Image (cartoon, rainbow, N blue to C red):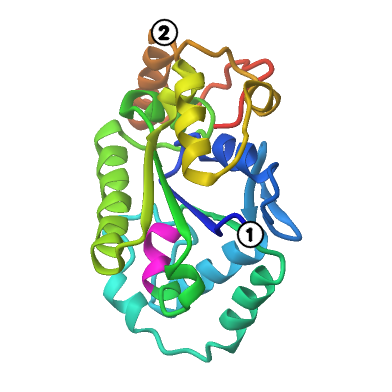
Amino acid sequence: MKDNLIIVTTGSSGSSVLAGLIGAHGYYLGDETMKLSFDTYENSRLVELNMALFKMIGFERGDANDMPPPDTDALAALAPDTDIFERFVDACLEKEPFLWKDPRLAYTLHFWQRFEPIRKAKFIFIRRDPVQSYAGLILSRKTPMSMKEQAQMNLNYALSFQRFVEKHAPMVYECLFEDLILEPGTFLTGLNEYLGCRITMDDLRGIYHGRLHRLRYSKWDVAKARVMYLLYRYVKRDFVTFPRGNSPKD
């Protein structure tokens, strides 16, 4: 039987492509999954509970994109009535293997680690080229953030997960989204070996609607993203909406 899997990610990392690709191979994603302009493949109940954990430590934002980031020591020390969280883990175990994916997990794993099935799951940490990630943040998410701010935010996610790994030593497969779309055959070989799956190129084409063997965002896209942010910040102009066509999940 496949191991339960947790995908740890920052925002705009291509993690939804990865989760959709893997989830189609027998993993339980949730009775309902979160929707943005695309399916995130994130268990809606997991997202709700992660947001509740943030509120318990006084972190007001629903995401983890603020600076300073959520306090991982406070999350680890939380002592709420854990029945609601334990019931959620048990419900996922009834349908295992399950797949959890939510950017907030980089922080809330410091709470969830108290449950043995979570510590024993396999983990994937997916990153994205910083420039590509920034272009996606502006062009797709329309999030007003400088490249420097996004780099610090992504570093905060990575450092938080690193602290979790150093303490609990789980099995972790680290990957780069650009490797998936530039060298998909090599990427899928390594991923299948780690998961014990048989994910194919046809599976990838079914979930990723961009062109393979090329970067998602061109130099022109990156330039547009920079201009859009500068106009937003210094001219106080709303983000311009550029046509995306049949866009892939970011």
Vertical arrangement, residue 202 with respect to residue 26, above or below: above
Q: Secondary structure at mark 2?
A: helix
Q: Nearer the viewer, residue 215 or 195?
A: 195
Read off the residue under disc 1: 97
Residue at screen point 40% across, 30% down: 133
Inter-mark Cα distance, 2 to 1: 42 Å
Q: Earlier in the sequence, mark 2 or mark 1?
A: 1
The amino acid marked with disc number 1 is Pro
Vertical arrangement, residue 72 with respect to residue 114, above or below: above
Q: Secondary structure at mark 1?
A: loop
Kindly indicate the quadrant of the structure image that contains residue 135: top left
* Tag 2–tag 1 contact (CB < 8 Å): no
Vertical arrangement, residue 144 with respect to residue 243, above or below: below
Answer few, some or many: residues within 10 Å of disc 2's Cα (few below 14, many 20 plus, some between 14 and 19).
few
Residue 60 % position (x, y): 43, 68
The amino acid marked with disc number 2 is Trp
Quadrant including the N terminus? bottom right
